Image (cartoon, helix red, strand yellow):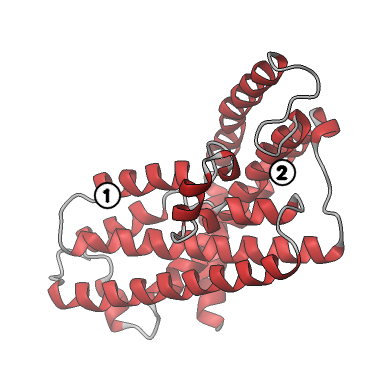
Amino acid sequence: MRKYFHAFNIGIQNNLTYRFNFLARALFGLIPLTAVIMLWRKIYAGKGDDAVIGSYTLAQMISYYLIITIVDALTAVNEDDWQIAADIKDGNISQFLLKPIDYLWFRVCLFLSGRVTYLAVACIPLTLFILWLHEYFVLPASAVTLGGFLLSAMLTAMLQFFFSYTMAMLAFWVTEVSTFIFILYAFEYIASGHLFPLDILPAGLQHVLAFTPFPYQLYFPVGIYMGKVTGTELAQGLLIQLSWVLFAYAMARFAWHRGIKKYSAVGG
């Protein structure tokens, strides 16, 4: 475990070198969020003061996007997939084949260090933004709700990372993985609830999405926080989310073992 803690520590130090980039990303990330909130305000304004869209009032809708911002800060995979693909193409993974360290868990440590650094840098502008809209921001209804949210957020982070890692493994077979990464990102952005709450969709489409991992990459933890997922549904949802994490982990391992058989060291 000491070697992975050391990798985590190195990741923190490397990320702090680019702390201004993290701050700029956090600040500019609030611009589209502000635009989305203004858009929903306009939509609700045209429907009257007591308007409800799906099951959301205006306050609940804005709160939904504020919580999404928090979950995204905790769990988003930013450049890890690109770095993994570059390691494969440049031959940098050769060293991991010769040393007693698992490349997957090495990358997990770097991913977690990136999230910690981002939160440390982005917490001030994010907190100020939430305080600006504090009348819309809700706190968890209970300790159980908070605990379920935090557990789900951790599973969300692992789910997103393992899927991104698996996608990056395509670099063993193709020279450019950017198209595949963008396609996955596009599906995640829409089907995970980032663009809009999934429960405002038609029931049939919600049912189809329930058989995919996408709702568990963002919408599910937000639903827990807002009290829309409770009791037995919460327990079942966490179990399903854990199952998707284990599936994504198995896919990541499978892709690595198949890819290594085709790997030819170039540089490194």
Three-letter code, disc 1: Phe
Which residue is labeled 2 in the image? 123
Position of 246 with respect to 73 (left or right) is left
Position of 177 relative to 145 (above/below): above
Report helix, strand or loop for mark 1: helix
* Front tag of 2 and 1: 1
Q: Nearer the viewer, residue 12 or 155?
A: 155
Marks 2 and 1, Cα distance to the nearest angstrom? Answer: 31 Å
Is 197 placed above or below 81 here? above
Q: In the visual, does 83 lie left or right of 188? A: left
> Which residue: 49% across, 70% down?
245
Quadrant containing the C terminus is bottom left
Residue 4 x, y percent position in the rendering? 51, 76
Locate the N terminus and report the quarter of the image it occupies: bottom right
Q: Which residue is mark 1?
A: 180
Q: Secondary structure at mark 2?
A: helix
Q: Looking at the picture, tell me which residue is in the foreground, 26 or 181.
A: 181
Local crowd size for mark 1, using a 10 Å CA cut-off: few (<14), some (14–19), many (≥20): few
Circle 2 packing at 10 Å, graded few (<14), some (14-19), many (20+), is some
Q: Residue at image x 14%, y 64%?
A: 266
- The percent coordinates of residue 255 (x first, y second) are 27, 72
For the residue marked with disc 2, what is the amino acid?
Cys
The quarter of the picture where residue 265 lies is bottom left
Identified at 43% across, 59% down, the residue is 212
Who comes first in sequence, dot 2 or dot 1? 2
Lateral position of residue 211 relative to residue 85, left or right: right
